[in-house]
Image (cartoon, rainbow, N blue to C red):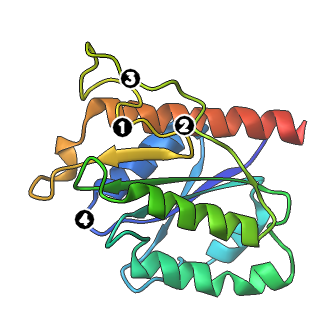
Amino acid sequence: MAKVVVVFHSGYGHTLRMAQSVADGADAELLPIDADGNLPTGGWETLAAADAILFGSPTYMANVSWQFKKFADASSKAWYAQAWKDKLAAGFTNSAGPNGDKLATLTALFGLAMQHGMIWVSQGLKPSNTKAATRNDINNLVSYSGAMAQSPSDASADAMSPGDLETARLFGQRVAEVTRKFRG
């Protein structure tokens, strides 16, 4: 069985909620980055044992959170040893605006994966972009490179769109399926 790990930082609970949906779809282990940018005890070993790693961060100022960036910088030891080479990777993000420069965050996550020699898994979902589409539809924010969600800045994580959470779940499911195919 393929081992999938979701490593993420969440500042206000929205990205945590998204990470939980991704993990539900992938039957994955959640590995939170704390408020100081650190992994829990055994976190690096968990990532070393993974077949696929999903990276998640809120989008702050057109990039990952500083806590996620600290984790990414600390992954240089794994990079030096090529510990994540040929593992599958994917990414997801959330911000308050419908756009909010989320693509810049996904590009940062993609760049991290490429630095490590990982193999990126796309979203694999068609967009909900017809005039009949609603905010609660799957892939309503129309992303192909990774899962995106939008949550109002003045609302709790409970206010997240059911469509965004289902998109995240389906994304996790896709990563798990591709991992099983890839790992044979």
| Of 137 and 31, the residue lying toward us | 137
Q: Residue at x 68, y 44 (%)?
A: 121
Q: Is residue 120 above or below residue 127?
A: below
Compared across the picture, whether 61 is left or right of 171 comes to left
Question: Label 2 belongs to which residue?
Answer: 171
Front: mark 4 or 2: 2
Dot placed on the residue nearer the N-terminal end, 4 or 2: 4
Inspect the image, locate mark 1, and give the three-letter code of the amino acid beneath it. Leu
> Do the numbered discs 4 and 2 sit on residues whose CB atoms are within 8 Å?
no
Q: Extreme left residue here?
A: 154
Front: mark 3 or 2: 3
Q: Residue at x 19, y 44 (%)?
A: 158
Dot placed on the residue nearer the N-terminal end, 1 or 3: 3
Question: Label 3 belongs to which residue?
Answer: 128
Question: Label 4 belongs to which residue?
Answer: 12
Quadrant of the image occupied by residue 114: bottom right
Q: CA distance from mark 4 to mark 2?
A: 22 Å
Q: Is residue 12 above or below residue 88?
A: below
Name the mark on residue 141.
Answer: 1
